[in-house]
């Protein structure tokens, strides 16, 4: 039986993703969040994909606020909250179910995975090239290899911002007609 717990301990455990959920009695959710968070940290370190740290931060924030939302639910609502694994598994053979019906979410996920893979390949290529490059070219090489990805991401962010503004302007024009 789940029950609300001490405010101080709920706060203290909420600082570790998943631990707060476990303290509140939601073991499946807690283990899911903890696995996702520490998996992101491990993968970002192992694959040198710093972008995964952003996913870890999002998971941490979700877990922190989720514990506090659970803590302040009325008792009758708290009792009906279902403890479930947060990653969609096929229960028959425990394989991850990759079927996502929302096209926009699928597209964002696909773009994220492509960006992650390209980032990893870029880091590997930079390391290999730097090993064979004479010292005289290191300054130029550093500028190209480390500033170019930042410039590409900056251009991408600007492009997304422009698309959002144009989409909103188009939507407002359609509503005013």
Image (cartoon, helix red, strand yellow):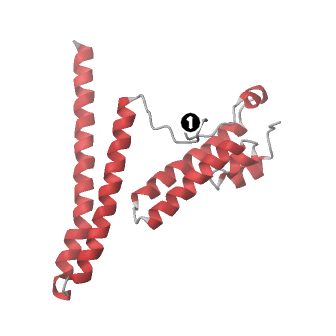
| Image quadrant assignment for residue 148 | bottom left
**Residue at screen point 39% across, 35% down:** 105
**Residue at screen point 20% across, 80% down:** 139
Q: Is residue 160 above or below residue 44?
A: above
Q: Secondary structure at mark 1?
A: loop
Q: Is residue 9 left or right of residue 56?
A: right
Q: Is residue 59 above or below residue 106?
A: below
Percent coordinates x, y for residue 69 in the rendering: 65, 38
Q: Is residue 121 left or right of residue 140?
A: right
Q: Is residue 50 left or right of residue 80?
A: left
Percent coordinates x, y for residue 159 in the rendering: 22, 44
| Count of marks overlaid on the render | 1
- The residue lying toward the viewer, choosing from 175 and 83, is 83
Q: Quadrant of the N terminus?
A: top right
Percent coordinates x, y for residue 30 in the rendering: 66, 47
Which residue is denoted by mark 1 in the rendering? 90
């Amino acid at each position: 039986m789940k029950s609300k717990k001490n405010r101080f301990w709920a706060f203290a455990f909420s600082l570790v993703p998943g631990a707060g959920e476990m303290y509140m009695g939601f073991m499946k959710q807690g283990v899911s969040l903890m696995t996702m968070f520490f998996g992101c940290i491990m993968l970002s370190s192992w694959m040198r994909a710093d972008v995964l740290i952003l996913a870890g931060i999002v998971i941490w924030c979700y877990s922190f606020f989720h514990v506090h939302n659970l803590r302040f639910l009325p008792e009758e609502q708290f009792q009906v909250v279902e403890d479930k694994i947060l990653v969609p598994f096929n229960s028959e053979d425990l394989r991850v179910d990759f079927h996502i019906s929302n096209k926009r979410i699928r597209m964002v996920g696909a773009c994220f995975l492509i960006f992650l893979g390209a980032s990893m390949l870029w880091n590997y290529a930079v390391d290999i090239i730097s090993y064979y490059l004479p010292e005289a070219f290191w300054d130029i090489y550093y500028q190209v290899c480390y500033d170019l990805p930042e410039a590409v991401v900056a251009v991408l962010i600007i492009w997304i911002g422009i698309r959002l503004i144009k989409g909103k302007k188009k939507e407002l024009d359609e509503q005013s007609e």
